[in-house]
Amino acid sequence: MSVAAEFEAANAKYASTFTKGDLALPPQRKVAIVACMDARLDTARALGLEEGDSHVIRNAGGRASDALRSIVISQQLLGTREIVIVHHTDCGMLTFTDEVIRGKIRSELKQDADHIAFLPFGDLEQSVLDDIRVLKESPLVLDVPITGYIYEVESGKIVKVGSSQ
């Protein structure tokens, strides 16, 4: 069975008892979370979230500049007034450089990806602080509290790294 078929079966079971179809469009807790796409990070469970609580914007590394479009929409159209950034230990973004991945794309796909910033980083804590700064300095982001964490994949704990307040 393909993974997509497994999802369809799981969704049929989920939908059969679904009772949350009346949740409001804006997130109830007025927070946007920017997190890494890593499969080991379950933001809902790790942060105690339920459906309708928050926006969760995920990308490779949980990078703020990559999430900017979604953050602007979240704030301007859906009323979020706080941002949380979650990076994590043992992140794949620590394992390569732009040059390495661009070379791999050239070699394997025969394509040029020099125009893409893949946003790897060499220091996990600094990456969180950099992303807080990116959002605080952006004229497109409201002046709201921004808090950064590192999620420990080994323990499930979040460790606060920085805050804009």
Image (cartoon, rainbow, N blue to C red):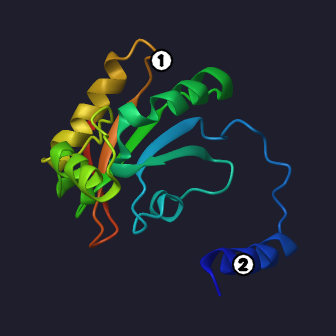
Instruction: Measuring from the top left, give residue 73's x and y in whole percent.
Output: 60, 27
Residue type highlighted by circle 2: Ala
Residue 69 relative to residue 85: left or right: right
**Relative side of 68 to 25, left or right:** left
Q: Amino acid at mark 1?
A: Leu
How many numbered dots are placed on residues in this image? 2
Position of residue 105 relative to residue 80, above or below, is below
Depth check, front residue: 84 or 4: 4
Q: Earlier in the sequence, mark 2 or mark 1?
A: 2
Residue name at image x 59 percent, y 30 percent: 74
Labels 2 and 1 touching (C-beta < 8 A): no
Whole-percent x, y for residue 90 in the image? 22, 64
Residue sitting farthest toward the front: 110
Tag 1's secondary structure? loop
Residue located 22% across and 41% down the image: 127
Residue 132 higher or lower than 84, as above or below: above
Name the residue that disc number 2 marks.
Answer: 10
Say which quadrant the C terminus sits in. Answer: top left
**C-alpha gap between disc 2 and disc 1:** 39 Å
In what quadrant of the picture does the N terminus appear?
bottom right
Q: In the figure, 136 relative to 19: above or below?
A: above
Depth-wise, is mark 2 or mark 1 nearer the camera? 2
Q: Position of residue 142 (x, y in %)?
A: 47, 17
Residue 63 vs 154, above or below: the answer is above
Q: Give the labeled residue for mark 1.
A: 142
